[in-house]
Amino acid sequence: MKKVVFIFWIIFFTASVSAQTVLTLDECKQLAVDNYPLIKQYGLIEQAEKYTLQNLSKNYLPQFGLNAQATYQSDVTKLPIDLSALSIPIEIPSLDKDQYKAVVEVSQLIWDGGATSSQQKITRANSEVENQRIEVNLYTVKDQINQLYFGILSIDKQLGIIDLTEQNLKSNKKTVTSMFNNGVAMQSDVDLIDVELLGLEQQRIEQKSLRKATLQMLSLFIHRPLDENTILQNPQDDFILSGDINRPELSLYNSQINMQNKQESSINAKNMPRINLFAQGGYGRPGLNMLEDKFKLFAIGGVKLSWNFGSLYTKKNEKKLIQNNISNIEVQRETFLFNTNVQLTKEQEEVKKAKKLLEKDDDIIRLRNRVKIASESKYKNGVYQMNELIRDINAESMARQSKALHEIQYLMNIYNYKHIQGN
C-alpha cells in the first residue's frame, strides 16, 4: 500500500512540474518579436520588391504599339514641273489632301545607359531601408519585455521575503502564545503579531495581483497563456564591459547611405543615350512612295539612338543634393552614437553601484538577524516590549527586501546596458 501511495505522489509531482511554464528572458524576447504584428511587414516589403523588380526587368521585352491617324493638309507635295508648257500631253497627278495611316511598331531596347539596372539596385536598397526600419521598431519591443520580465522577477523576490517574514512572525507567535497561556505575556502582544501577519497578507495580495497583471501583459506580447504557476528564470550575470555598439539604428543609417549612393548612380544613367532596334509595319495613303496616291502596305526597320541632354542642366545640383542627404544621415548617426555612449556610461555606473550595494547587503542582513535574535531573547526575559521586537523583525525583513531589490536591479542594469549596446 505504501508503495502505491509513493508511486501516486511521484506521478502527481511530475504532472505538477510539467504543468508549469518555465521561460527565459531570451525566449520571451524572441517570442515577442516573432508574434508582434509589425513582423508581417517583412513579407509585404518582399512582395513589393519582387513585383517592382519584375516590372523593371520587362523593360528589355519587346515593346508593341499601334498608331493610327487621319489628316487633312492645306497643301501636298507637288513636282515643280509644268509639262504643258513643253507641249507634253502628260498630267502628273497630285496627292489628295486627306491622308490616312495606321502603323504597328515593335521596339527592342538594346542599351539604356544602365537606367534599368540602376532602378533595380534602388529598389533593393529601398527594401533594405524599410526592413531596417522594422528592425529598429522591433528593438523597442525587446526593451518592453525587459521591463516586464524583471518586474515579475522583482515581485517574486518580494513574495519570497513576505513568506520568510511570515514564518518568522508565526514562530514568534507560538512563543508569545505559550507565554500568554503561562501568564507571562499579554493578549496585546499576540494581537500585535496578528496585525503584522494581516499586513503581510495584504502585501501578498497586492504583489500577487501585480504579478498577475504583469504576466497578462507579457502573455499578450509572447502569444502564450501564462498563469500564476509560470516560472521565469533569472538571467545570467555575465556582464562584460565592451565599447562596441551593435544597434539596428546603425544598420538603418548604413542602408540609407547605400540608398543615396544608388540614387547617385541613377543620375549618371539618366544622362546616357538609349539604343533601340525598331520595326514598323503599316497601311496608308500614301505609302512610302509619296508620289503614289493609293493605299499601300509598307515596312521600316532600323536602329534608333535617343539622347536627352536636358537632364544635364540639373545633374550637378542633383548630385549635390545626394551628398547633402548623405551628410545629414552621417550627422544623425554621429548624434545617435554620442547619445548612446552617454547612456552606456550612465548605465555602467548603475551596474557598479548596484554591485557595491549588494556587497553590503549580506553584512546588513547578518547584523539585522543578530539584532532580531537578541530582541527575541530580550522579549522572553521581559526586557523588550512586543512592539520593539516587531520593529527589529521588520528591520530584518526590510534588509532582505533591499537585497532582493538590489539583486534584480543589478541584473536589470546589466541587461539595460546590453540593450543600449545592442547585444
Image (spheres, rainbow, N blue to C red):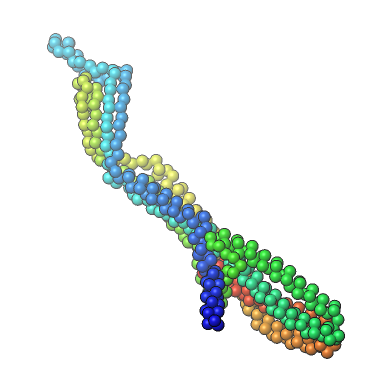
Q: Quadrant of residue 392?
A: bottom right
Q: Which quadrant does the N terminus fall into? A: bottom right
- From this view, report whether residue 36 is shown above or below residue 346: above
Residue placed at 31% from the left, 40% from the top?
Answer: 306
Tell how many labels: 0
Measured from the top left, where is residue 55 in percent x and y?
A: 36, 45
Residue placed at 77% from the left, 81% from the top?
Answer: 173
**Residue 47 visible in the snapshot:** yes
- From this view, report whether residue 371 is shown above or below residue 423: below
Which residue is most to the left? 88
* Residue 20 left/right relative to 94: right
* Residue 195 left/right relative to 106: right
Residue placed at 22% from the left, 33% from the top?
Answer: 300
Measured from the top left, where is residue 290 in percent x and y?
A: 22, 23
* Residue 397 left/right relative to 235: right
**Residue 232 visible in the snapshot:** no
Residue placed at 64% from the left, 72% from the top?
Answer: 156
Which residue is most to the front? 1
* Residue 327 left/right relative to 97: right
Q: Quadrant of residue 356?
A: bottom right
Measured from the top left, where is residue 84 in percent x and y?
A: 17, 10
Measured from the top left, where is residue 382 in percent x and y?
A: 85, 87
Foreground: 389 or 261? 389
